[in-house]
Every structure is written in C-alpha cells, then in structure tokens.
C-alpha cells in the first residue's frame, strides 16, 4: 500500500486572476499528484469557509499564503505515512484537525486541495483512470452538459438579473454529440448577437455577456438560436436557468423580474409564466438560501403542473448533507448542485451525492465561476453517475478543459460508454 510521504502547497491563480491553493501530494511509490481549488463569487452563507489573507495588502487581501502554510505544516505532518487508498480516513483526519463546522480553522480551500490531490494520487498508483478509481471499474455514464451560454448577474457587467442562461441537449446519444449540439447553438447565438450589434465578448463562465434589457430578451435570443441551429426547443434542446436569487433578495423580497422588489408570491408567478411561455426545464436557486417556504410552495405548484421541471438547490444546499436532508423532508427541490468546495472534502461530497440519489434527487456536478485547468469534476461526474455537469460555455480553457476531459473519458470507455438521460 503506497504511503503519503510529502505534501506541498503552492499559491497559483484562478480564471479571474485571483490567488488560489494548489496542493501536491507525494507517495513512497514515487508518484505524485496535484489539485487546484476553485472559488465562487455568488456564494451561499452556509458554505465552508475559504481562508484568505485579508490583512495582506500586497495581494489586496486576496492571497492564500496562510492556507499554503497550513498545507505545508499541520496537514503535511498529520497525513504523513497515511495509506493513499484510504480516502475516508484522510478526509476524517482533515475534519478532526479542523474541528469546526465550516472549516474555519484550516480553511476549506487548504483541506479540499489535499483531499482531491490524494484521490488523484491513489488513482495514479493504481494505474487506473480517476473516474474508475472514484466510482469503481464499471462507471460508464457520461453526464449531460448544462452549458451557460449567456452570463448575467454577478458573473457579468451587463444588467441581466438572472445569472445563468443555459442550454441542455436533451436527447444526445453520446457526449460528443451533446457537445456538438451545444457548439451549433452557440455559433448561431454568436451570429444573431452580432447581427443586432450586441457584444459577443464573454463573461466569467465563457457565455456571452451582451447588454440586453431583461431576462426575456436573453431567453428569446437562445430560443431563436436553438431553432436556427435546426433543433426542436424543449424536445431536443431545452433552456435552463440559474437565478442565483440570493443576490436578488432583500427584506423578504426579490428583484428577479426587474430592479423592483416583489414579494415571493409574485416571483413564483413570474417563474410559472416563464415556464409556460418558454421551453425551460430546470431552474436553479429560484429563491434565497433560507427562504424554505417559497421553495416548498414552488415545488408544490411545479408538481401540480405535471411539467417535469428540475428545481435545483445550489446556495440552498451548499453540498451539505444536513441541509439536503432538510430539503428532502420539506420537499423544497428535486435536484442538487454539487460543488466540492462548498463542503470541503471529497468524502463529504460523495456522501451528499449518495444521499441525493437515494432520495431520487438529480445531481449536477458543478465548477465555480473562478476555476482553473483542473478537470477533477469531469471524473467526479462520471464516477458518481451524475446525470448532469455544469461547467460553463464552450469558451475559456478552464471551462473547455472539463468538456475535453469528458470526451477523453468517453473515448476510453468506447462501446461501454452510455449517456445519461433525464
Ligand atoms: P459562483 O456561481 O461559482 O460564482 O458562486 C455559480 C453558481 O451560482 O452556480
Ligand atoms: Zn448557482
């Protein structure tokens, strides 16, 4: 059994140009592996803690040097001689070392970098692909991509209120076909935006960030692109939204529709109207992270409509087992967005996915808006049999890297590869 002999942290930079943590773990069989943690901007308050050097003026308070020091000292010492194949024990030791609920002592960024790098190292030592190491050798299901093709909210400097306007190729038979469909719709969208003199420069997640007037205008552009690309809206390519409504919530009211704040009932009606009017199949964070009542009321209406709409908790659940259990009990959603850095260890991430699947919740493995060349989430999606992955548009290498990794996984699986269906 290979043993951990050294762990080294280093400060690198994410796709927004902000410092972030990379950890490199070495084992006594001569192997080593590294992982880089991402960072979000529309964060839930219940997420695990990201440790930054707020007082370090040299990096405008954004460096992660303390976190690197923790990796190099406390963590490295505590995991010395650990069996690299015992991920649960590695993660439990990291949890014990920290001892706080939100990982405030060591920082979730320090912990997660080591947790993920250890799993990559184990796969290398076993000489098998990461997705097979994580999910077992029979893992063979590729996720449907949810591509964020128009960026708004906190991810762009336009005035779109909804944060993410995505497309999902509903019926793709292979992952490469799914990517091809998205590519064709994106190219059409680019042409249409150009024709109407809108900017086609991109936002944080690689989607276009035109200065459109309102949500509907963005949806209309996407709808036309789907049709002009030759696909049936809803049937072949659907529209999915991430409202990220935490950012649009104040004193019990929401400014989702316009800059005016409406009470939740009006916001619910607005969503129901959108669903009626457009081929929308998934809505993420329609309500704020602690507005459980609106989530439950919305779900009831969705169920009654028989429309098979996916209602996704991101900031609501923050990849946290306790919060997901509450959601299951209160019937607040039917899907969970999974971001490993919201919780901080790989074991906890996998446990939350298992709980979701046990309760017939869909799982969507997700990047963060500040991400890197690390493609870990692509392997995680296949390993856990998650039906979907959300990792931006077909632009910006930190987004495309995940899609390219999935294409390689599909090729490796050959005739055993199968595509998730919704
Ligand atoms: P974030 O947003 O990574 O900026 O927090 C992504 C999301 O809300 O899904
Ligand atoms: Zn979200």
Image: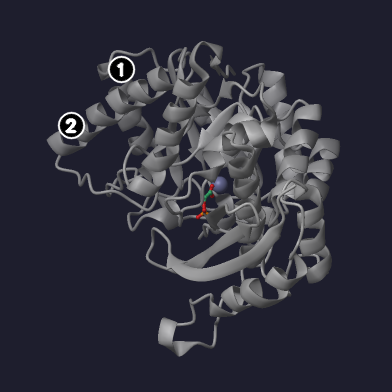
Residue at figure coordinates x 78%, y 70% from the top left = 98
Q: Is residue 181 left or right of residue 360?
A: left
Nearer to the camera, 77 or 359: 77
Nearer to the camera, 212 or 44: 44
Asked if 27 appears above or below 206 in the picture, the reply is: below
Asked if 267 appears above or below 106 in the picture, the reply is: above
Residue at figure coordinates x 21%, y 37% from the top left = 193
Q: Is residue 165 left or right of residue 383?
A: left
The percent coordinates of residue 121 (x first, y second) are 61, 49
Nearer to the camera, 341 or 166: 341
Secondary structure category for the residue under label 1? helix
Q: What is the number of the mark on residue 191? A: 2
Local crowd size for mark 2, using a 10 Å CA cut-off: few (<14), some (14–19), many (≥20)? some
Asked if 148 appears above or below 277 in the picture, the reply is: below
Nearer to the camera, 67 or 252: 67
Task: Identify the image quadrant of the C terminus.
Answer: top right
Q: Which residue is mark 1?
A: 227
């Amino acid at each position: 059994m290979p043993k951990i002999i050294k762990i080294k942290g280093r400060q690198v930079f994410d796709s927004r140009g902000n410092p972030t943590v990379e950890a490199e773990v070495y084992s006594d069989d001569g192997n080593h592996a590294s992982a880089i943690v991402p960072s979000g901007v529309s964060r839930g308050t219940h997420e695990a803690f990201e440790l930054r050097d707020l007082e370090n003026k040299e990096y405008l308070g954004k460096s992660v040097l303390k976190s690197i020091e923790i990796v190099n000292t406390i963590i490295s010492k505590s995991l010395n001689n650990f069996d690299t194949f015992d991920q649960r024990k590695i993660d439990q030791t990291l949890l014990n070392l920290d001892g706080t609920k939100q990982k405030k002592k060591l920082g979730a960024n320090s912990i997660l970098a080591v947790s993920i790098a250890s799993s990559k190292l184990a796969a290398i030592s076993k000489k098998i692909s990461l997705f097979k190491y994580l999910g077992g050798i029979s893992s063979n299901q590729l996720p449907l991509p949810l591509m964020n093709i128009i960026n708004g909210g906190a991810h762009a400097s336009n005035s779109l209120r909804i944060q993410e306007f995505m497309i999902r190729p509903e019926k793709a038979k292979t992952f490469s076909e799914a990517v091809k469909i998205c590519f064709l719709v994106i190219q059409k969208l680019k042409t249409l935006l150009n024709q109407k003199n809108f900017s086609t420069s991109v936002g944080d997640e690689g989607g276009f960030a035109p200065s459109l007037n309102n949500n509907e205008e963005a949806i209309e552009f996407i709808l036309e692109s789907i049709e002009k690309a030759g696909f049936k809206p809803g049937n072949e390519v659907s529209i999915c939204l991430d409202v990220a409504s935490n950012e649009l919530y104040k004193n019990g009211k929401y400014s989702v529709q316009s800059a005016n704040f409406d009470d939740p009932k009006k916001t619910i009606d607005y969503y129901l109207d959108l669903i009626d009017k457009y081929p929308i199949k998934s809505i993420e964070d329609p309500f704020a992270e602690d507005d459980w009542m609106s989530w439950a009321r919305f779900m009831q209406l969705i169920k009654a409509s028989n429309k098979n709409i996916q209602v996704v908790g991101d900031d609501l659940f923050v990849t946290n087992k306790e919060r997901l259990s509450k959601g299951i009990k209160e019937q607040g959603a039917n899907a969970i967005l999974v971001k490993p850095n919201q919780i901080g260890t790989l074991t906890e991430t996998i446990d939350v996915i298992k709980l979701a699947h046990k309760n017939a919740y869909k799982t969507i493995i997700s990047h963060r808006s500040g991400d890197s060349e690390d493609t870990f989430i692509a392997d995680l999606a296949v390993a856990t049999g998650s039906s979907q992955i959300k990792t931006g548009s077909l632009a910006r290498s930190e987004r495309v890297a995940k899609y390219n990794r999935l294409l390689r996984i599909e090729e490796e699986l050959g005739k055993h590869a199968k595509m998730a269906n919704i």
